[in-house]
Image (cartoon, rainbow, N blue to C red):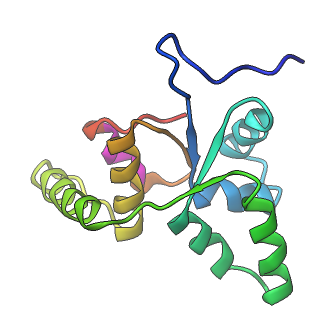
Amino acid sequence: MGRRSGRDARGTRHLIAVDSSAWIGHLRNAPDDAVRRLRGLFGREPLVVGDIVLLEVLQGARDDGHARQLEQFLRQFVVLPMLDDSVACQAAANYRLLRSRGMTVRKTVDLVIGTWRIRHGIALLHDDRDFDPMQALGLRVA
């Protein structure tokens, strides 16, 4: 199997950010579509783990040893910071806009993650319905 370059015609990388819902499904060996898609991307596309996603996965570890194993696994991918004051303000604006359209994102963390991905044009691989309303704002799903 050939390795794809991950570059488009302009030379920019096609990054795919993976949400904790897909990572957790993978780690639990869940038989769902997000896990199958994630496993199909290993070694073929550059994957991103947001720092908030790293937090969400690590907080579910059984103990410190398990947390170290999970962290070592996730750090083989690109880990990027996701929240700053600018993203915070945009996430709040996105929440208000979606609410005005009758859609609600239930979890603030998902609002931040989705807003960051929209801002950076990075596709999202997830298994979490909270991201569905954010597609109306331009969130690309992998």
Residue 65 x/y as whole percent: 86, 85
The residue most toward the bottom is 63
Q: Say if residue 86 shows up in the picture.
A: yes
Residue 116, image x, y percentages: 37, 52
Which residue is depicted at the point 55% across and 29% down?
14
Give the side of residue 5 with respect to residue 136, left or right. right
Q: In the image, what residue occupies the spot 31% across and 60% down?
A: 105
Pinpoint residue 115: horizontal percent, then vertical percent.
Answer: 33, 52
For the N terminus, give its image quadrant: top right
- The quarter in which the C terminus is drawn is top right
- In the depicted structure, whether residue 140 falls above or below residue 92: above
Residue in view at x 37 percent, y 65 percent: 83
In-image side of 21 versus 118 (left or right): right
Q: Quadrant of residue 139?
A: top left
User: Residue 65 or 84: which is nearer the viewer?
Assistant: 84
The percent position of residue 117, horizontal first and vertical second, equals: 41, 46
Q: Is residue 138 magenta?
A: no
Query: Which stretch did the figure color magenta?
Result: 131-135
* 10 sits left or right of 15 in the view: left
Residue 134 part of the magenta segment: yes
In this view, which residue lies farthest toward the left? Answer: 100
